[in-house]
Amino acid sequence: MVSISPSRPTGLLKLGFTLPRYLYRWHLGWLLGHRCLMMTHIGRKSGRRRQTVLEVVRYDPSTQECIVMSGYGAQSDWYRNIQLRPVVEVQIGRQHYTPRQRMLAAEETYAILSEYRQLHPWLFREFMHMLGYSYDGTDESLHALSHALRGVALRPERL
């Protein structure tokens, strides 16, 4: 089964999550290829520009669509922000663009998580463990994850 209230990152995990942001700020984000992206969004309370680096769980080179997941579900600040105001900019590889965003339903999230689990079984299990989910590898727990996590598709407005 899967727990649905993971803990926030601390210590080395928090540091590991923040380091890629500096690569983007130093104009070295291209080193991460299409595995990560940095999104710029507007804070729902402060109105200030915020930047968040996320792992890309699926990238389609033909449409340039990137799918990212909110590992902390609907309570993630970036996810709550983009529900109020759309993403302002995406940086991935050497590209910068204004995206069109689409929130994924649980069924689509399940399909993407299932594909990711097949492609990266060890990484998937470790990410779930690091995020604090008690994921046991069964399809039942993957279904529970697909309702706990939130997926977002981002693609350039124009190709």
Image (tube, rainbow, N blue to C red):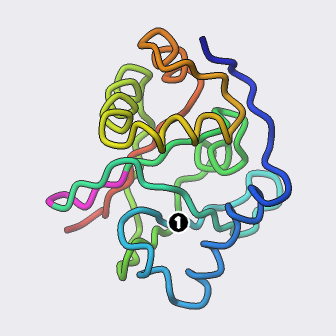
Q: Amino acid at mark 1?
A: Val
86 or 16: nearer the viewer: 16
In the rendered view, would you say 61 is above or below 128? below
Which residue is farthest front? Answer: 122
Which residue is farthest bottom? Answer: 26
The verdict on residue 122 being magenta is no
Residue that appears at 39% across and 24% down: 110
In the rendered view, would you say 132 is above or below 148? below
Is residue 12 shown left or right of residue 85?
right
Residue that appears at 57% across and 40% down: 126
Residue 19 % position (x, y): 67, 72
Q: Which residue is mark 1?
A: 88
Residue 46 % position (x, y): 82, 60
Q: Quadrant of the N terminus?
A: top right
Residue 27 % position (x, y): 52, 90
In the rendered view, would you say 79 is above or below 106? below
Residue 49 % position (x, y): 69, 69
Quarter occupied by residue 18: bottom right
Q: Which residues are magenta?
A: 62-66
Is residue 14 shown left or right of residue 158?
right
